[in-house]
Amino acid sequence: MPNSRRTPAARLDPRGPLVLDARTLPRRPGSARTLTRTVPAPADLHTGLAGIPEGSDLRLDVTLESVTEGVLATVTAVAPVTGECARCLEPVAQTIEVRCHAPSAGRCSPRRARNTGMRVPLTPDGRGCGNG
């Protein structure tokens, strides 16, 4: 029987557009690396009434910072959101900007990242940003 208790990080595609390589980050706390990346939005960025359309541009401004506990990813994401008003059901569309912090304590320390090629995931549903 397949192991159904696998952690989300175990299923992580290291080549995925929402996975950042932390191997080049220096091990000294306070060391940082910044990058900007525009990727196609995955299908699962939505709630009941609104969401980011699959394939639309998702701009990510990322700072990877080496901290004592591991790696901290600070991400600002900018993307279009479409949906409908819960009150009148009229369509709505706007661009949103969201900032979050994704600590990767233990599983992605700079030393471990350098030695084993660990990655920092930035995906929804417990697979990244906001999930330590």
Image (cartoon, helix red, strand yellow):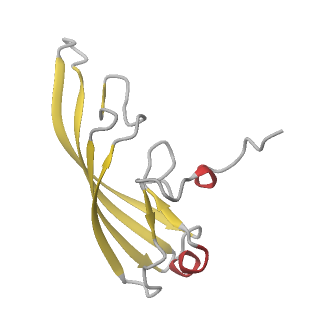
Q: Whole-percent x and y of residue 47?
A: 37, 29
Whether residue 21 sits left or right of residue 91 in the image: it is right
Q: Nearer the viewer, residue 70 or 14?
A: 14
Q: Whole-percent x and y of residue 78?
A: 22, 48
Q: Residue furthest bottom?
A: 28
Q: Residue furthest top?
A: 88
Q: Nearer the viewer, residue 132 or 114?
A: 114
**Measured along the vertical axis of the image, is residue 66 above or below residue 124?**
below
Whether residue 84 sits left or right of residue 105 in the image: it is left
Q: Whole-percent x and y of residue 30?
A: 37, 83
**Measured along the vertical axis of the image, is residue 86 above or below residue 21?**
above
Q: Residue furthest front?
A: 15
Please report the residue visible at 51 percent of the width from the left and 78 percent of the height from the top.
110
Please report the residue visible at 84 percent of the width from the left and 38 percent of the height from the top.
1
Whether residue 127 sits left or right of residue 73 in the image: it is right
**Measured along the vertical axis of the image, is residue 98 above or below residue 108?**
above
Please report the residue visible at 55 percent of the width from the left and 69 percent of the height from the top.
118
